[in-house]
């Protein structure tokens, strides 16, 4: 066969092979990046929220969630242990601390001095039950059947947190004062697995509090609606992992709960007067150890007082004033 004809015959095959090799190379690079690099690229986020009653002093709140700790994860443990240098006024932990029955000592040692700070916590499903491998496409179906793994030692974790002074907010109302800021806090057990019993904390929190704070592991709308209706200023949650696998210019593919993708992490408004903060968390399931365009994180929130210079405050106050003028 003539060499030119042979070249033309082989050209499509060669181009297809190059494309296949290139695609495989990109996929391999993406897998290595998401499972080795970004999964361990822990980040400290900062946000400022005007949610306190007028005249209250600023409050620095460290929000931790979804550590999903394994005993062997020494890099994560070392990074978390450095957070005590921030000296927050309050620590809030919204659950899923464990991924292994022997991980409680690792969690307590990593938290270290943070356990000496005032703290509040609620648990998530992976404090109660170990993770299990699952088809990742099930995450795209909100009603997929959930299968619990082996029981985890959540009682030991709760006892360790409580002995160090953190307050369990699960299905109870807690009142505390931190640096002169009066806080009324209430939480529910993980609504993602149907353990929430909001009626146990229903009703308007103490009107004399400078901050009315709600806690839940999974930011399910039915729970957020109840907190908002009762007059809470801020709800803090985790669970979503920020989507865990995100696409540039699109964001999270799924939220793993009923909340919409626009609120999968960070600060958003819920209703007319309540703020929501969802942490993207620090960990992953050991059966899906990857993050892409969604670094693991902890957030330091600086809560400040609402003032008449805040547009949100002015808008909220103008409505009753207008109604009064029209009546």
Image (spheres, rainbow, N blue to C red):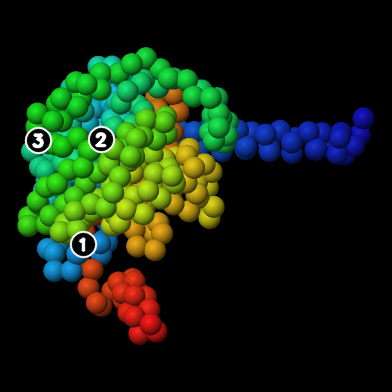
Which residue occupies 60% across, 33% down? 24
Quadrant of image for the N terminus: top right
Q: Point out the tag, 3 or 2, that comes first from the N-terminus.
A: 3
- For disc 3, the marked residue is 165
- Measure the alpha-carbon separation of dots 1 and 3: 24 Å
Instruction: State which quadrant residue 219 falls in.
Output: top left
- Measure the alpha-carbon separation of dots 2 and 1: 23 Å
Instruction: State which quadrant residue 310 falls in.
Output: bottom left
Q: Which residue occupies the foreground of this view, 197 or 40?
A: 197
Query: Is 29 placed above or below 49 here?
Result: above
- For disc 2, the marked residue is 170
- Measure the alpha-carbon separation of dots 3 and 2: 15 Å
For label 3, the crowd category at 10 Å Cα-Cα, with few meaning under 14, some 14 to 19 and many 20 or more, is some
Q: For this view, does 163 lie left or right of residue 244?
A: left
SS type, badge 3: loop
Residue at the top extreme, as displayed:
150
Which residue occupies 68% across, 38% down? 19
Which residue occupies 15% across, 30% down? 161
Which residue occupies 49% across, 24% down? 146
Which percent across, then down, holds residue 113? 9, 37
Q: Point out the tag, 1 or 3, that comes first from the N-terminus.
A: 1
The answer to the question of whether label 1 and label 3 lie on touching residues, with beta carbons closer than 8 A, is no
- Where residue 202 is drawn, which disc sits there? none
Q: Is residue 208 visible?
A: yes
Instruction: State which quadrant residue 94 falls in.
Output: top left
- For disc 1, the marked residue is 52
SS type, badge 2: loop
Which percent across, then down, holds residue 156? 19, 20
Q: Which residue occupies the foreground of this view, 128 or 208?
A: 208
Quadrant of image for the C terminus: bottom left
Q: Point out the tag, 2 or 1, that comes first from the N-terminus.
A: 1
């Amino acid at each position: 066969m003539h060499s030119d004809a042979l070249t033309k015959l082989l050209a499509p095959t060669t181009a297809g092979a190059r494309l296949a090799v290139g695609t495989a190379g990109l996929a391999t690079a993406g897998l290595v990046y998401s499972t080795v690099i970004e999964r361990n690229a822990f980040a400290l986020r900062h946000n400022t929220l005007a949610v306190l009653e007028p005249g209250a002093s600023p409050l620095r709140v460290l929000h931790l969630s979804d550590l999903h700790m394994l005993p062997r994860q020494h890099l994560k443990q070392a990074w978390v242990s450095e957070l005590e240098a921030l000296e927050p006024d309050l620590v809030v932990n919204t659950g899923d601390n464990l991924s292994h029955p022997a991980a409680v000592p690792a969690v307590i040692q990593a938290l270290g001095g943070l356990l000496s700070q005032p703290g509040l916590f609620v648990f998530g499903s992976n404090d109660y039950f170990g993770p299990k491998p699952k088809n990742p496409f099930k995450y795209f179906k909100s009603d997929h059947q959930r299968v619990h793994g082996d029981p985890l030692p959540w009682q030991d974790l709760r006892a360790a947190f409580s002995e160090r002074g953190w307050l369990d907010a699960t299905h109870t109302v807690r009142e505390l004062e931190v640096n002169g800021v009066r806080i009324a806090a209430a939480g529910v057990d993980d609504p993602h697995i149907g353990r929430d019993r909001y009626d146990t904390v229903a009703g308007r929190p103490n009107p004399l509090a400078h901050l009315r704070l709600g806690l839940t592991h999974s930011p399910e709308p039915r729970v957020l609606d109840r907190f908002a209706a009762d007059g809470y200023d801020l709800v803090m949650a985790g669970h979503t992992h920020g989507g865990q696998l995100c696409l540039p210019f699109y964001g999270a593919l799924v939220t793993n709960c009923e909340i919409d993708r626009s609120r999968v992490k960070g600060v958003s408004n819920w209703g007319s007067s309540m703020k929501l903060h969802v942490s993207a968390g620090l960990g992953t399931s050991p059966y899906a150890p990857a993050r892409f365009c969604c670094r693991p994180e902890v957030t330091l929130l600086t809560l400040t007082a609402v003032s008449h210079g805040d547009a949100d405050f002015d808008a909220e106050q103008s409505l009753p004033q207008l109604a009064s003028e029209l009546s």
